[in-house]
């Protein structure tokens, strides 16, 4: 597919890009090669294939919720640089 100057200008504006004249010819050629490749993909016969969302069937791996012993808050707070009333003290952001 041939990309003319008008179409390239519209693409440039839509993508909010500012392309130098030196880059323009190189990018036009790259876009044309990409579109030619997509045209090749359109020639592939996929009439006997079922549409799919992703190329690999994925199944969510779930695990059973199990209550496990966790370290006591006091033990966790031993690692805190500063602690107050059972909470971590951090520098004020605002």
Image (cartoon, rainbow, N blue to C red):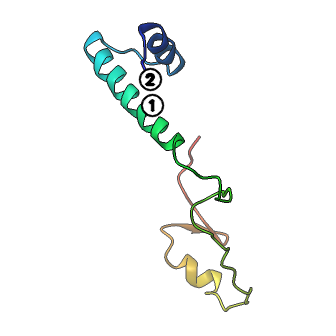
- Crowd rating for badge 2 (residues with CA inside 10 Å; few <14, some 14–19, many 20+): few
Helix, strand or loop at mark 1: helix
Q: Which residue is mark 2?
A: 1
Quadrant of residue 66 within the rendered picture = bottom right
**Rendered residue at 33%/23% (across/down):** 29
Q: Is residue 44 above or below residue 7?
A: below
Q: Position of residue 79 (x, y in %)?
A: 49, 76
Q: Position of residue 24 (x, y in %)?
A: 32, 15
Badge 1 vs badge 2, beta-carbon distance below 8 Å: yes
**Rendered residue at 52%/48% (across/down):** 44
Q: Position of residue 22 (x, y in %)?
A: 25, 14
**Rendered residue at 67%/74% (across/down):** 59
Report the side of 94 relative to 62 (left or right).
Answer: left
- Crowd rating for badge 1 (residues with CA inside 10 Å; few <14, some 14–19, many 20+): some
**Rendered residue at 65%/58% (across/down):** 48
Q: Is residue 88 above or below residue 70?
A: above
Q: Is residue 35 above or below residue 74?
A: above
Where's the C terminus, which quadrant? Answer: top right
Report the side of 16 relative to 22 (left or right).
Answer: right
| Dot 1 or dot 2, earlier in sequence | 2
Towards the viewer: 88 or 45: 45
Q: Position of residue 38 (x, y in %)?
A: 47, 37
Q: Residue furthest left?
A: 22
Q: Which residue is mark 1?
A: 35
Q: Residue furthest top?
A: 6
Where's the N terminus, which quadrant? Answer: top left
Number of numbered labels in the structure image: 2
Helix, strand or loop at mark 2: loop
């Amino acid at each position: 597919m041939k990309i003319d100057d008008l179409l390239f200008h519209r693409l440039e504006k839509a993508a909010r890009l500012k392309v130098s004249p030196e880059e323009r010819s190189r990018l036009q050629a790259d876009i044309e090669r990409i579109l030619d490749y997509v045209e090749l993909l359109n020639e592939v016969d996929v009439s006997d294939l079922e549409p799919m969302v992703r190329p690999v069937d994925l199944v969510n791996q779930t695990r059973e919720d199990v209550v496990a012993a966790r370290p006591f808050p006091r033990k966790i707070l031993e690692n805190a640089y500063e602690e107050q009333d059972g909470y971590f003290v951090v520098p004020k952001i605002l």
